[in-house]
Image (cartoon, grey):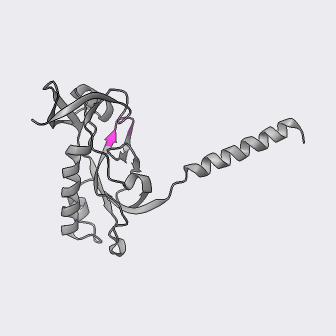
């Protein structure tokens, strides 16, 4: 076999392996923009919608990416898409976080939550059509019953330091929080 053909075969094999490594198992979940959208879903009870929304809203303050300036937050999430967090930096400065743009919960199909953690979702300026978790895992643009990557369904990590400008969840500074303001 000629050398160029064997290189081509090796490259094709490597490409196939790389592509198959990207395939991650998916699980059933439900994604909603608002509580009202969930309540209007015929498969999910109103009480379940309210419970899961409240859980995501409570997590939002703990797990949302945090910034020391509103400008840095808005650079990642868009103008008027950030709010002041109920925390202060160790130096007493304000902390900013993106607005919760939706939430994800376990699918209620067949009465099964499927191990999906209820959590807030966000949209960044570099990918405004897709939802992302607080740990920057892409969920997709679909609402209602949907499939999401299993790794995106884990409870998001609690954020105890602010994000340096340069990407949602990319790096963190050593600026911790002192608690609620």
Give the camera-side residue of 156 and 15.
Answer: 156
Residue 101 visible in the snapshot: yes
Residue drawn 29% across the image and 33% down it: 78
Question: Compared to 167, does 114 lie above or below?
Answer: below
- Image position of 109 (left or right of 98): right
Residue 115, percent from left and from top: 36, 63
Residue 149, percent from left and from top: 44, 55
Q: Main secondary structure of the magenta part?
A: strand
Residue 121 forms part of the magenta stretch: no
Question: Compared to 175, does 9 lie above or below?
Answer: below
Residue 81 visible in the snapshot: no
Quadrant of residue 118 within the rendered picture: bottom left
Residue 165, percent from left and from top: 33, 26
Residue sticking out furthest to the top: 91
Give the camera-side residue of 60 and 175.
Answer: 175
Q: Looking at the figure, which quarter contains the N terminus?
A: top right
Residue drawn 37% across the image and 61% down it: 29
Residue drawn 35% across the image and 60% down it: 116
Question: Compared to 148, does 177 lie above or below?
Answer: above
Residue sticking out furthest to the bottom: 110
Q: Which residues lie in the magenta part?
A: 123-127
Q: Looking at the figure, which quarter contains the C terminus?
A: top left
Residue 69, percent from left and from top: 22, 26
Quadrant of residue 63 within the rendered picture: top left
Residue drawn 22% across the image and 28% down it: 70
- Image position of 97 (left or right of 179): right
- Image position of 175 (left or right of 31): left
């Amino acid at each position: 076999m000629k050398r160029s053909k064997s290189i081509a075969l090796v490259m094709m094999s490597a490409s196939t392996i790389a592509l198959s490594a990207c395939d991650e198992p998916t699980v059933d979940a439900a994604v909603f923009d608002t509580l009202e959208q969930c309540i209007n879903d015929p498969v999910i009870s109103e009480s379940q919608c309210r419970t899961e929304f409240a859980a995501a809203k409570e997590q939002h303050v703990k797990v949302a990416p945090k910034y020391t300036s509103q400008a840095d937050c808005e650079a990642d999430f868009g103008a008027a898409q950030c709010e002041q967090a109920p925390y202060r930096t160790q130096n007493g400065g304000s902390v900013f976080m993106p607005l919760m743009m939706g939430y994800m919960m376990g699918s209620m199909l067949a009465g099964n939550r499927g191990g999906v953690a209820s959590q807030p979702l966000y949209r960044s300026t570099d990918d405004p059509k897709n939802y992302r978790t607080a740990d920057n895992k892409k969920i997709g643009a679909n609402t209602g019953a949907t499939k999401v990557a299993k790794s995106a369904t884990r409870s998001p990590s609690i954020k105890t330091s602010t994000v340096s400008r340069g990407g949602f969840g990319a790096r963190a500074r050593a600026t911790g929080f002192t608690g609620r303001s």
